[in-house]
Image: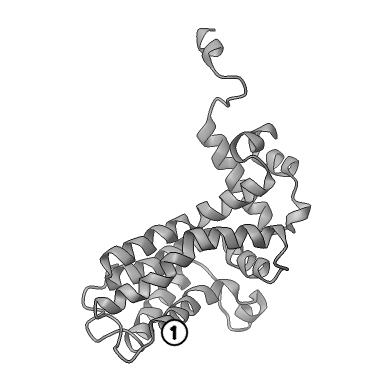
Amino acid sequence: MAAEKSRKAGRPNKPTDTREKLVLHSRQLFTVMPYDKVSTRMIAEKAGVNIAMIRYYFGSKEGLFETMLRETLAPMKKMMNALIEDGGQDNLFGLMRTYYREMNNVPEFPRLVIQVMHFAPSNTQRSLLEKVMADVMKPTEDKMFQSLQRQGLIREDADPKLCKISFLSLMVFPFIAPPALLNMHGIEINEEFLSQLLEHNIQMMAHGFLTAGALSNDSE
């Protein structure tokens, strides 16, 4: 009884679990349904929690959508920061490896990003996504290949900006390609395929914009 009295009004018993459920199930809904068709009640019911918890943790549906974006991108942000700090090719490959691992769990997320970026600038989803990308990804993206260049891991005749585009294209394409196109070529996005693709992409980069010594310490 004393513990019950000491608990603040409105505070959930298991905050971390409740919050994680809301982020997880909101992502599942936002990635397969139009934003305006996803209600807070729908998210709460799918997560099995009280709808009031959305306002408690995130303030609104917009706040939950923004948090979902940030937390989905967080593992990539961590690897990009390591890439800037260390400048090693292992971190470059680690970024691609991390992206494949995380997106294999939520393959609809990259398509959501592409779809939202085609919306009008005034669209709520696009505004929130651009805000998150500006805060989380863009500053790091601008620096990571400059860092590799300073470490002598990018060929002197290669433009770091164009190298970044090539890297992102290799990394993202499997998840944004139309499923029908992948099926035509007998491709199924799964852990085994992504592991093979990662090794292939490493070799592509080694024979493209990376220097001859860039693969000397490749990590598994």
Query: Does residue 50 appear in this view?
Result: no
Question: Is any part of residue 124 visible from this angle?
Answer: yes
Which amino acid lies under the numbered mark 1 shown in the image of this protein? Leu
Up-down relation of residue 122 to residue 48 (above or below): below
Q: How many marks?
A: 1
Q: Which image quarter: residue 7?
A: top right
For this orientation, the residue located farthest to the bottom is 157
x then y, percent, for residue 1: 54, 7
Callout 1: few (<14), some (14-19), or many (20+) C-alpha neighbours within 10 Å? Answer: few
Which residue was labeled with disc 1?
A: 162
Q: Secondary structure at mark 1?
A: helix
Q: In the visual, does 16 lie left or right of 201?
A: right
Horizontal side, residue 215 vs residue 40: left or right = left
Residue drawn at the location 73% of the way across and 68% of the way down: 120
Q: Residue at x 74, y 40 (%)?
A: 41
Q: Is residue 66 above or below residue 56?
A: below
Residue 156 position within the rendered picture, expressed as x and y whole percent measured from the top left: 29, 89
Q: Residue furthest right?
A: 37
Query: For this view, does 119 lie left or right of residue 6?
Result: right
Quarter in which the C terminus is drawn: bottom left
Q: Is residue 77 above or below residue 218?
A: above
